[in-house]
Image: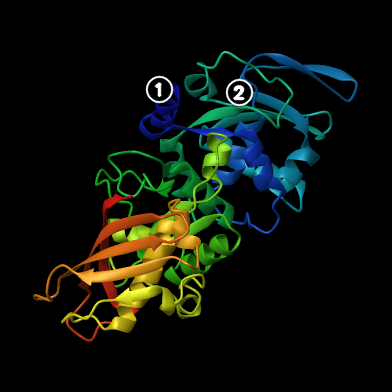
Amino acid sequence: MNYQLELKQIVEFPRCRIYRDFIQTLISDKSIRTNGRSFLFYYLVLCSYANYRTSYRRLEHLVYTVGPGEWICPLKELQSWFRCKFQHQVISILQNFEEQHYISYTIMEKDKIVKFRILDWNSDNTILEYNYPCKKDAGFFFFPIVRVHELIGMGKCSEMDVLLDLWIHAVYNDTSVMGSDSGPVVYFRNNTGNPLTSFQTLADRWGQSKASVSRLLKKLEEKGLITLISFKGKYGSMIYLKNYLSVMFDISDVMIDKEEIAMKMQLPIHIPEEEESSCVPENVTDEQITVSKNDSCVPESHMKFIIKKVAELLNTQGIPCCHCQETQYILSPLSACKELYTTFTLDIICHFGNVKYCFELSLSPGDTSPIWPEQMDAVSLKSKGGE
């Protein structure tokens, strides 16, 4: 019960929990660029070092009082965190935040030390009854989501700003958001409950071109930070975050199966050409599959392809028989091919454990042209029980 309340708080409350060590990880990741004009990353760095309660810090043989929402550090440290070549660039960023009434700051000790204060810190971070005065690699802080929209609206977002925008807008296990039961999905809270978005929408949001957005999302996916699922036509795309659950809740992350998401959304998935040759699991062979003779409009070779994908899906859901090369798959028709909808029964038999699973499989093609495996519009799988 407590775990469910914790999840729900992040989804529904108008602020997001940001872990300090997550920001530290981003600071040290030099492969993600920070050059942009939205300043979301810079502001979150400042927040990640801010105090919860009053403490004291010694610098240059002097002891400074650091209050809630404040921090004091050498200007060189801030320059390193921001990845600026020159200190005047750091001061320019701080001045911009001060003009926007986000912070106040002071340069001391012959321009060597900077002390800053987050102006609205007390309104967002007064509930937690703990304090890490100088331990900046642990704990978390709350960040208002409305501030994200303000910051990314200032100008072109950097790669780091984009990643943080996706992270803050992730939703997990919310019944009002489609696809969130499968994993942490990016949802920009547009009151539709539909996480589908387009590259053009993201381009407008981040101040970039569609081509730049496409390249950036591909880069984040190659780095293992997101899972991008693109659907055919004008349906759009869904973005799932990797490592989100382990960072936010200290639990194991889930594996996102693109075909499973496409089944749930009942949308035709787009499979890039380089992925098509590797999308069929090698552990299921044609010899394991038996397709009963019928008058179906779906060719037998295509049905075997679909069964292999179903076996891959069931394997990820924890059915061990689908990983055994002795398992037999028997497909029998339940209905004739009327219009463009066909129903089958799929029996999965494991001879070693004397186990049998029975499923009902429904198929509908994307159009009236000859059906190829990558053109299957929807595949719904319903369990009929197992022995």
Where is 360 relative to 59, above or below?
A: below
Residue that appears at 63% across and 27% down? 139
Q: Amino acid at mark 1?
A: Met
Q: Nearest the camera: 123 or 31?
A: 31
Where is 329 relative to 301, above or below?
A: above
Residue that appears at 41% across and 49% down? 186
250 sits to left or right of 80? left
Residue that appears at 31% across and 69% down? 330
Q: Can I make out residue 197 in this image?
A: no
Q: Position of residue 258 (x, y in %)?
A: 41, 62
Q: Which-is-in-front pick, marks 1 and 2? A: 1
Q: Nearest the camera: 40 or 32?
A: 32
279 sits to left or right of 379? right
How dense is the environment of label 2, judged by Cα within 10 Å: few (below 14), some, or many (20 and up)? Answer: many
Q: Which residue is mark 1?
A: 1
How far apart are the two marked residues, 1 and 2, measured between alpha carbons? Answer: 32 Å
Q: Amino acid at mark 2?
A: Gly
277 sits to left or right of 374? right
Q: Position of residue 142 (x, y in %)?
A: 51, 28
How dense is the environment of label 1, judged by Cα within 10 Å: few (below 14), some, or many (20 and up)? Answer: few
Q: Position of residue 100 (x, y in %)?
A: 51, 37
Q: Which residue is mark 2?
A: 69
